[in-house]
Image (cartoon, coloured by chain):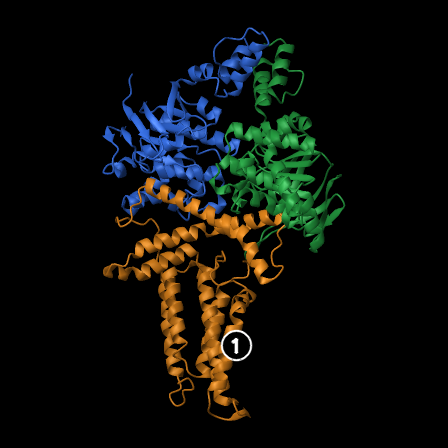
Chain colours: A orange, B green, C blue
């Protein structure tokens, strides 16, 4: 459970921690789009430089980011491998009939690899530096135009924030139940797959029961405290857009201009 | 079985997500004799639960060692030692009813013994015995534990530990959340078991009346260290130190202090129970 | 001076299972004055908690009426009534809905669609009343059970209620946190004229009340001051000082023959 880095928040005081979640979300989505605009090594080099710059800004160790990529590394390598095999063009380095490795293939593979890793890095930057609840607020704000077409954005956000609120409790409880069953002689991570699956019941069942109980309790609490779904309600949580948020968006625009200027109109390996 | 528990310079910490918490146990040295009944007190986060967990290897010491009888637990996960120690150390967590999972009470109580390769017949026999001991009827064996009341669930969970026939019994606030009567029943049951089965018993509690009524010795945990290890009576006699730790007094002692302050009359002994207080008051002629 | 009646329960009857005959509550009637502290005691299964759930409209009575501040509880009035009477539940964790202390106090206000500026003031006031103003930005994992219950009380106070109803709200707390909360309740009763109804099996908590109602098997079997109830009811374990009085009495000492509080006992010993 401690291995998953993507989606985890690291408390800190860096500039990124203090940016508005909307600014961070918009910038991240925008950056990911930019990855598809760049089409030569100069463009990618620039984007890599930007990615590392942002990662430095977050005050989180590079090692942590690399741990975030690890669970996905095989998927990435597999995709990259396919790209290398199935892209033809340029000098051919190896030609074993079915398996052909060409210059274009290698370049294309490098680009695909870069895109994948940068997407992971940048999304990790956002989640590592933003409290889950602020992220919810940010998503809520960004989706609020959908209210005009009757999407219950506020309610979704409230549900999301309550779920987030109870994730630490759920983790605690999982730990407790696992400890309790280990004390009763279960060992986890041993035996055949079937045996291991069987060992899950003593953990999943109590968690299921306690989650149900918790949900019931919470429904009562919410009702007693006057929550009625569909009724208009104000929000105490505020997002504050500051100068640095505007500046960060300006930075993204600046980055776009350079990436576009760097685009190589002649050769486009990617299409 | 002789089950002395010895902590030798135990230091431990948790990996909590990305953050390694500061040491939750710092250089703990402690020796609890076999067949003793020890209460562990201290504030939330003082390291009480962590101390308990190191005894059966749910938390491994980073430095130092914990010895339970002949078994030694150190940082380099000795798998065999862990299995062995858990067989000898029964651990009842806080709100243990949260660990119930099986379809029937019998299956749930059998879970522990079966994990330790006790034959099914023997496990069933132990189940009946344990159930009887916690004061539940045999007819409940085939019932789903989830259909029972909260108090009954707690008893089933404790029976699940007793059926492992441990030599050391550790309980983290066994009475939490129960009504006064239910709490008293559980605790006197534990006390009875302690003397009958010659167990080494350790409980964590916030209630000083429980400490006074059931325990022989007290360990005070403070910021991951052992601040004191004394007999119950010595412990409660040092009024000033207790106030510094912000530790409560048993009700009898509390009233004694109040009376002594108001009257200026010192009672002849440290009164931990209502009977002692009654006698002392009569002895000095206040009542 | 007769104080106005704030809560009137009349002939209240309730069954969980309509097919069965055993009433969970049968024909319970009582009333509570504004500013009074009433304790409701009784064994598990005596119907105390059912009563609490009926009073806040989480359950619907089969027969009988509940009147709060001259308004009869019904499907139509329950939302308005819930602003006048707040319920503190047993489990501190499960009733903490917000991500931080101030968010949690805000929850009820948000449901009332209160403007941000008003909320800010009310939250500040409410947190001050329970002594949690310095914890405003803490999240529940940083709070003790007692502190969470304080926040729950603040969430109710922010709505300017008449009555706070506590359903075994302190059972999961350590003795010190309990005592701290008792004095907070006392303060609220004396300075804010808040009516307190506490459902409990803690004799020390019951002894603090102006009046005790004793429930047994769904019936209200006794009603009176702590003095009256503890001296005549053999089923209830009395507070420590009274136990001492009985012990001394049994030893043939000339103690007064009626119930004694701790202060009275100390005074008598010092005579």
Q: Residue at x 65, y 21 (%)?
A: B270
Task: Give coordinates of residue C250: x percent, y percent.
Answer: 57, 10
| Residue B135 to residue B44: above or below | above
Which quadrant would the N terminus of chain B be assigned to in this image? top right
**Is any atom of residue A52 visible in this view?**
yes
Task: Give coordinates of residue B228: x percent, y percent.
Answer: 67, 35
User: Looking at the rendering, which quadrant does residue C249 occupy?
Assistant: top right
Q: Residue at x 69, y 47 (%)?
A: B85
Which quadrant would the C terminus of chain B be assigned to in this image? top right
Q: Residue at x 23, y 30 (%)?
A: C71
| Residue C254 to residue C159: above or below | above
Q: Nearer the viewer, residue A215 or C258?
A: A215
**Is any atom of residue B217 visible in this view?**
no
| Residue C254 to residue A1: above or below | above
**Count of numbered circles on the image:** 1
Task: Give coordinates of residue A233: x percent, y percent.
Answer: 28, 48
User: Looking at the rendering, which quadrant does residue C89 occupy?
Assistant: top left
Whether residue C4 sits left or right of residue C88 in the image: it is left
Q: Report the chain holding disc 1.
A: A
Task: Give coordinates of residue B21: x percent, y percent.
Answer: 58, 51
List the residue tagged with mark 1: A77
SS of the residue under disc 1:
helix
């Amino acid at each position: 459970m401690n291995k998953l880095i993507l989606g985890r928040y690291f408390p800190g005081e860096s500039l990124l921690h203090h940016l508005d979640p909307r600014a961070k979300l918009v910038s991240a989505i925008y950056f990911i789009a930019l990855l598809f605009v760049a089409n030569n090594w100069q463009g990618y080099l620039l984007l890599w430089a930007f990615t590392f710059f942002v990662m430095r800004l977050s005050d989180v160790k590079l090692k942590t980011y690399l741990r975030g990529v690890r669970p996905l590394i095989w998927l990435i390598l597999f995709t990259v491998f396919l790209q290398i095999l199935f892209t033809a063009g340029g000098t051919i380095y190896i030609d074993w009939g079915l398996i052909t490795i060409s210059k274009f293939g290698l370049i294309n593979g490098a680009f695909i690899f870069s895109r994948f890793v940068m997407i992971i890095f940048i999304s990790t930057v956002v989640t590592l530096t933003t409290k889950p609840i602020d992220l919810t607020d940010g998503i809520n704000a960004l989706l609020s135009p959908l209210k005009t077409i009757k999407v219950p954005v506020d309610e979704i956000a409230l549900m999301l924030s309550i779920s987030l609120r109870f994730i630490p409790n759920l983790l605690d409880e999982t730990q407790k139940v696992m400890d309790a069953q280990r004390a009763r002689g279960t060992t986890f991570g041993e035996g055949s797959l079937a045996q291991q699956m069987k060992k899950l019941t003593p953990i999943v069942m109590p968690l299921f029961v306690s989650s149900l109980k918790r949900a019931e309790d919470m429904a009562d609490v919410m009702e007693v405290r006057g929550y009625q779904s569909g009724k208009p309600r104000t929000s105490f949580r505020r997002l504050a857009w500051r100068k640095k948020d505007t500046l960060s968006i300006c930075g993204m625009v600046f980055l776009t201009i350079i990436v576009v200027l760097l685009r190589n109109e002649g050769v486009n390996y990617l299409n | 079985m002789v089950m002395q528990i010895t902590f030798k310079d135990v230091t431990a910490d948790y990996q909590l997500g990305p953050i390694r918490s500061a040491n939750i146990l710092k250089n703990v040295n402690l020796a609890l004799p076999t067949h003793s009944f020890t209460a562990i007190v201290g504030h939330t986060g003082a390291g009480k639960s962590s101390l308990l967990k190191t005894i059966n290897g749910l938390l491994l010491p980073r430095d130092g060692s914990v010895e339970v009888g002949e078994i030694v637990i150190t940082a380099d996960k000795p798998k065999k030692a862990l299995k062995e120690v858990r067989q000898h150390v029964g651990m009842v967590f806080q709100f243990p009813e949260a660990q119930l999972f099986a379809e029937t009470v019998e299956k749930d109580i059998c879970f522990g013994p079966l994990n330790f390769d006790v034959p099914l017949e023997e496990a069933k026999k132990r189940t009946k015995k344990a159930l009887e001991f916690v004061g539940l009827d045999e007819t409940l064996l085939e019932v789903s534990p989830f259909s029972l009341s909260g108090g009954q669930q707690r008893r089933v969970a404790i029976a699940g530990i007793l059926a492992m026939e441990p030599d050391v019994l550790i309980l983290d606030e066994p009475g939490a959340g129960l009504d006064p009567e239910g709490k008293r029943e559980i605790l006197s049951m534990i006390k009875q078991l302690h003397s009958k089965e010659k167990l080494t018993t350790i409980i964590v509690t916030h209630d000083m009346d429980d400490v006074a009524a059931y325990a022989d010795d007290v360990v005070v945990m403070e910021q991951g260290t052992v601040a004191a290890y004394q007999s119950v009576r010595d412990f409660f006699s040092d009024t000033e130190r207790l106030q510094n730790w912000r530790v409560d007094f048993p009700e009898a002692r509390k009233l004694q202090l109040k009376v002594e302050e108001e009257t200026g009359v010192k009672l002849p002994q440290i009164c931990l129970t209502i009977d002692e207080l009654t006698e002392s008051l009569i002895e000095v002629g206040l009542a | 001076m007769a104080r106005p009646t704030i809560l009137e329960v009349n002939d209240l009857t309730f069954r969980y299972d309509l097919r069965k005959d055993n009433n969970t509550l049968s024909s319970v009637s009582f009333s509570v004055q504004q500013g009074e502290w009433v304790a409701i005691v009784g064994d598990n299964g005596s119907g105390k908690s059912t009563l609490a759930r009926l009073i806040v409209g989480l359950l619907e009575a089969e027969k009988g009426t509940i009147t709060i501040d001259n308004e009869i509880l019904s499907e139509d009035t329950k939302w308005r009534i819930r602003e006048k009477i707040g319920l503190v539940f047993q489990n501190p964790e499960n009733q903490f809905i917000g991500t931080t202390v101030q968010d949690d106090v805000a929850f009820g206000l948000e449901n009332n669609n209160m403007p941000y500026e008003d909320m800010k003031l009310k939250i500040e006031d409410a947190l001050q009343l329970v002594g949690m103003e310095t914890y405003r930005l803490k999240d529940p994992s940083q709070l003790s059970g007692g502190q969470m219950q304080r926040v729950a009380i603040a969430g109710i106070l922010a709505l300017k209620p008449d009555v706070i109803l506590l359903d075994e709200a302190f059972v999961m707390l350590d003795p010190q946190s309990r005592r701290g909360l008792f004095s907070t309740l006392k303060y609220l009763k004396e300075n804010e004229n808040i009516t307190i109804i506490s459902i409990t099996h803690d004799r020390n908590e019951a002894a603090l009340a102006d009046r005790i109602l004793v429930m047994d098997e769904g019936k209200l079997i006794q009603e009176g001051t702590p003095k009256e109830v503890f001296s005549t009811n053999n089923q209830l374990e009395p507070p420590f000082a009274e136990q001492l009085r009985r012990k001394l009495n049994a030893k043939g000492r000339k103690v007064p023959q009626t119930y004694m509080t701790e202060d009275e006992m100390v005074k008598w010993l010092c005579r």
